[in-house]
Amino acid sequence: MDLQVLLESTLRGLGYELVDFEWSGQGKLLRIFIDKPDGIVVEDCVLVSDHLTKLFAVEAVDYERLEVSSPGLDRPLKKAQDFERFAGEEARVKMRVPINGQRNFIGILRCVKGGMLEMDVDGVLVTLDLASLEKARLVPKF
């Protein structure tokens, strides 16, 4: 089974969202980033870690160490729903291909329409194709 599909369906059933996951250290360390509307606390990470440890034993997922955590203040934005959820927030977006000679944008997320992200960058409305997005993260507020 595809690990992303397994994680998404399992976490959704527990009331969490899979933000991202990554393999590190030659595939020995599996990091999983989770979220929920009212935020993540240590107890959430413990609950998910315990559940996934049992699930991975049954599904024969090969790993040595599992880390479960919140996505942090600079949460990555991956799906169209992420951009919609955080509309009105400031984000840093990097595109795969330059748009008018520019790949990096910092601005306020506005909306997503038909796979296109609208951002206010220094008072100018910029439209970016989500399919060409390399990475995006919220800009932390302190």
Image (cartoon, helix red, strand yellow):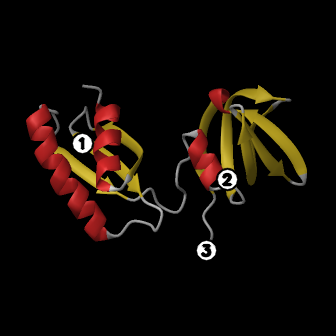
For the point 63% across and 56% down, the residue is 86
Q: Quickly name the residue at label 2.
A: 91
Are discs 1 and 2 less than 8 Å apart at CB?
Answer: no
Please name the residue shown 78% across and 47% down the image: 119
69 sits to left or right of 133: left
How far across and how far down the image is residue 56, in percent?
15, 39
Q: Earlier in the sequence, mark 1 or mark 3?
A: 1
Q: Is residue 58 above or below residue 141?
A: above
**How dense is the environment of label 3, judged by Cα within 10 Å: few (below 14), some, or many (20 and up)?**
few
Q: Which mark is residue 142?
A: 3
Dot 2 falls on a residue whose secondary structure is strand
Q: Which labelled disc corresponds to residue 29?
A: 1
Residue 78's x, y, as percent?
54, 41
| Amino acid of disc 1 | Leu
Q: Quadrant of the C terminus?
A: bottom right
Q: How many marks?
A: 3
* Three-letter code for the amino acid on which mark 2 is drawn: Ala
Which residue corresponds to the image point at 55% horizontal and 57% vertical from the top-left?
Answer: 74
Q: Quadrant of residue 135?
A: top right
Residue 120 position, x and y percent, is: 82, 51
Which residue sits furthest right? Answer: 123
